[in-house]
Image: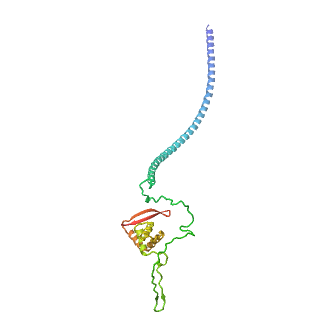
Amino acid sequence: MDTDKMLIELDRLNKRCERYVGLYMSSSHKNETLIIKNKQLIQVNAELKKSNMIHKRVNDELVNDIRALENIINTKNESLNSKNDEIAELKKQIESLNKENSKLKSIIGKDVENSSIPSSINVYKKKVTNSREKSNKSKGGQKGHKGHSLEYLEATSVEVVNHDEICPKCGYISKPNIPHNLVNNVTYGKSLKSMVVLLNAYGLVSINRTAKMVNELTGGFIKIAESSICNIIKETSKKCECEIEVIKEKLLASPVLHVEETPIRSEGKLGYVHVLANN
């Protein structure tokens, strides 16, 4: 009886051992599988670490690039802000200049027709006196043109005394020349020349009106040409060169000098009359 129990117990123990061996074998197989998987995971982990290092290096490079770009952007923004300030300042200047330009245009645009400016000072506006076209011909009468001159008055007796002088030592006969103011066919005396200069230079009478006044004052006998009046003025001016130099020196030595510039048109061109005075 005891032997049967022992056999049964041995059998039970044997079965338990077989079960344990099976469990061990199964556990050992699983362990080997886990070891293989662990090795695979270790390899994958190493590859991931390597990849992570590469990604980290790339990331650092990208971060540096981003920082460099941010610096560039900040610099560009500062430059743009500076340019915007300059543009704003230029806009203010342009606005101010536009206002000033409009004001100047309104001043320049004023003439004798749209303002109270007298027509006598409107010399900047060139006026066409005639519709004839310009040519290469010289001024004055052309070849073949019938000239005009003063007509002779009624015959009058003029006595010119010509004294011949004989040298008592050598017998040379000295003959004086005829006065230069009697050489030309048409001559004007000192009185008439003085009156012409007085009217034109001192009285500020125009050349045209001076000629008319001479004609009227002489009852129509003397019809002096405007060109002759100009020549008389030039002749007188040349004789006064020394006096003019003295006047210039006195003007330059004056403590206060008044200067004026007046525009004037002559022969279709714009010129200026300068006046200097100390009194």
Nearest the camera: 75 or 225? 225
Can you name the residue that lies furthest to the bottom here?
A: 169
Nearest the camera: 273 or 174? 174
In the displayed structure, 50 sits above or below 125; it is above
For residue 240, say whether it is visible.
Answer: no
Please give left or right for residue 29 compared with residue 203 in the image: right
Instruction: Give me the residue at 61% from left, 32% from top.
Output: 44
Instruction: Give me the residue at 62% from left, 23% from top.
Output: 30
Nearest the camera: 191 or 104? 191
In the displayed structure, 47 sits above or below 171; it is above
Can you name the residue that lies furthest to the front here?
A: 154
Residue 100 percent coordinates (x, y): 44, 52
Instruction: Give me the residue at 59% from left, 36% from top.
Output: 51
Residue 245 percent coordinates (x, y): 42, 72
Instruction: Give me the residue at 51% from left, 45% from top.
Output: 76
Residue 12 percent coordinates (x, y): 62, 13
Give the quarter of the figure containing the N terminus. Answer: top right
Displayed quadrant of residue 254: bottom left
